Amino acid sequence: MSDGCDVHAIERDAIEREWPPDAEGFPHRQAARTVLINPAGETYLIHGHDVDDPDFNWWFTVGGGIMAGESAREGAVRELREETGLVISPARLEGPVLYREATFHFVGNTRKQDEHFFVARLDTHEADAVTTGTGRELTALEENVLDQGRWFSLGQLTGLIEAGDHVFPQDLVHYLRGWLAGWDGSTIHVTER
């Protein structure tokens, strides 16, 4: 950049503000995620990579960190709007359907994230809006690390995993089978490292 600004340094500062250290010293945050399901029973996933290791990449659900003063449900719909452009009411979210305690390596550090997952069932018009992404508001880091978004059937998602692609949460296909049939009102608790 012509003004001498280091974009990566700015991104790292923003990341560290979003991930304050916990009692054990790990960068740790609360997050909210939304499992989108279209009328064909497909789910929408985003493909991304680590800014420090572009060869490490994975597919994941829409979502991100919960801001101060937000509930998990409010954070989920805000992240949905920011990452896809779709605006829905928090009341439309089912769940939380899953609570995931995750430990992973991202941007040069081992991080912890406690994630509240919700399900949103979309009509055809809403699913098309997610595909086009009109109105997205990505951060500089998201612009850098989010590669693409795509709808997957259960069969396509299973094939992706069998081909060696990383998908998070790890048992998403199993969970989706249950959620496609309808949410039973329970919250699944998982820990992934």
Image (spheres, rainbow, N blue to C red):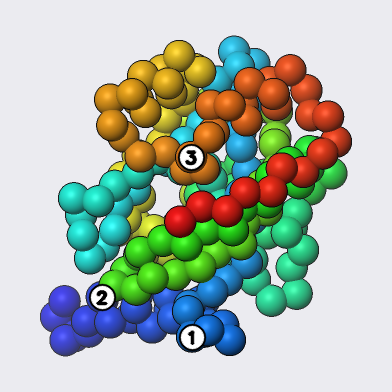
Q: Position of residue 186 (x, y in %)?
A: 82, 39
Report, in whole angstroms, how far the alpha carbon at label 2 lies from the one at label 3. Answer: 29 Å
Q: Relative to residue 8, is residue 5 depicted above or below? A: below
The CA distance from mark 1 to mark 2 is 23 Å
Q: How many numbered circles does the render carry?
A: 3
Question: Where residue 99 appears, x then y in whole percent?
Answer: 68, 51
Spot occupied by residue 18 in the image (x, y as percentages of width and height): 52, 76
What is the three-letter code of the residue carrying label 2?
Answer: His
Label 1 SS: loop
Relative to residue 56, is residue 126 depicted above or below?
Answer: above
The residue located at (22%, 81%) in the rendering is 6
Q: Secondary structure at mark 3?
A: loop
Judging by the rendered image, the residue that carries numbered circle 1 is: 25
Using the rendered view, name the quadrant where residue 65 is placed.
bottom right
Judged left or right of residue 138, residue 160 is left
Q: Quadrant of the N terminus?
A: bottom left
> On screen, 103 above or below 187?
below
Residue holding disc 3: 170
The amino acid at mark 1 is Gly
Mark 1 and mark 3: span between their CA atoms? 25 Å
Query: Which residue position holds label 2?
Result: 8
Report the residue at 43% width, 75% height from top: 15
User: Which-is-in-front pick, marks 2 and 3?
Assistant: 3
Mark found first going from the N terminus, 2 or 3: 2
